[in-house]
Image (tube, helix red, strand yellow):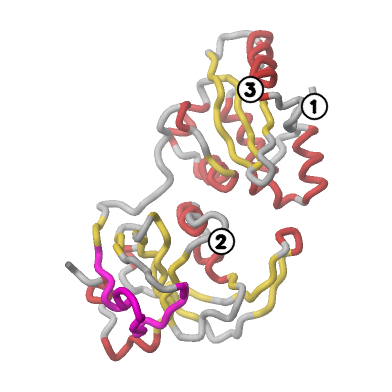
Amino acid sequence: MLKLLDVLKISEGELKQYKVHFATGTNDKKKPYKKFLIGEFREWQECQTNKNFSRPYILSLIYYGKDLWVYGGVYRVLDEPPVPIEIPEEHWRGWKYSTELSDCQTDLIGRVFVSYKKEYRQSYPNLEMTPENGIPPRDMCISSVLDKRVSINDFGGFDQVNIDYETLQTIIRDEIPSWRSALSNVKGVYLIADKLTGKQYVGSAYGDECIWQRWTAYARDGHGGNRELKALLERHGETYRYNFKYSILEVCNMNLGNEYIIGRESYWKEVLQTREFGLNQN
């Protein structure tokens, strides 16, 4: 099989200039992949709990699935030393690096998948490391190459919608055509779930609003004018909106009256008991 370093043209003599970053999230292993999809991977990678980037270059591999990684690029660590940072609302503190994407095979970013069973704990091994178990990082092999860079999927159907807040922001910001077309032509009932607590909010789009228009408001500030969600963000801070996930419970024809859709909203509130145990107050 074709070795990744052969494709990247990294020679044996250059290995000691590189750290490998096997990028995985702590609670959500695919968080860095999600950041990559919305164009925020570099910023995410630059924030580190420890001073992990002690070499000139970072070879970034992003967790995709069991023993499968996406090539995320080679980043140059700039001369500025990392600075301490703190995010109080997330109870997180660490170090902020300054990096820039190098020109190392940028056309393969998001297209090359690497099959590699990492049988050691280090997430930031030296590229020349020889582990006690398993294959050395320098011998990683390419498993597949896509024709196009991975991206947020086209709209797959109303029963397939299950997206987090950052993905919603990207869909609305970029006006992804398949999503805009689908959500601009229906009213209906939707669900917002809090990933931290499991509590749910049932809402609806009716009157002159379609779901696209309603969700555009959520993408803007997280609460969309809803009293309950606004109060939740006031208690926990604006960044709490990144814990929200969005799905669609029921779609309705644009010609249906307000009373019908409000009735269906009430039905789902009763089914899911979101007044008693969730985020709905009425």
Q: Secondary structure at mark 2?
A: loop
Residue 262 location (% of width, % of height) = 68, 14
Residue 63 location (% of width, % of height) = 42, 60
Decide if residue 128 is on the left or right side of residue 202. left
**Residue range of the region highlighted in magenta in the rendering:** 121-142
Q: Main secondary structure of the magenta part?
A: loop
Image-quadrant location for residue 57: bottom left
Decide if residue 165 is on the left or right side of residue 185. right
Distance of label 1 from label 2 (alpha carbons): 33 Å
Distance of label 1 from label 3 (alpha carbons): 17 Å
Distance of label 2 from label 3 (alpha carbons): 35 Å
Q: Quadrant of the C terminus?
A: top right
- Residue under numbered circle 2: 26
In this rendering, is residue 243 above or below 192? below
- Residue under numbered circle 3: 205
Identify the disc placed on residue 281. Answer: 1
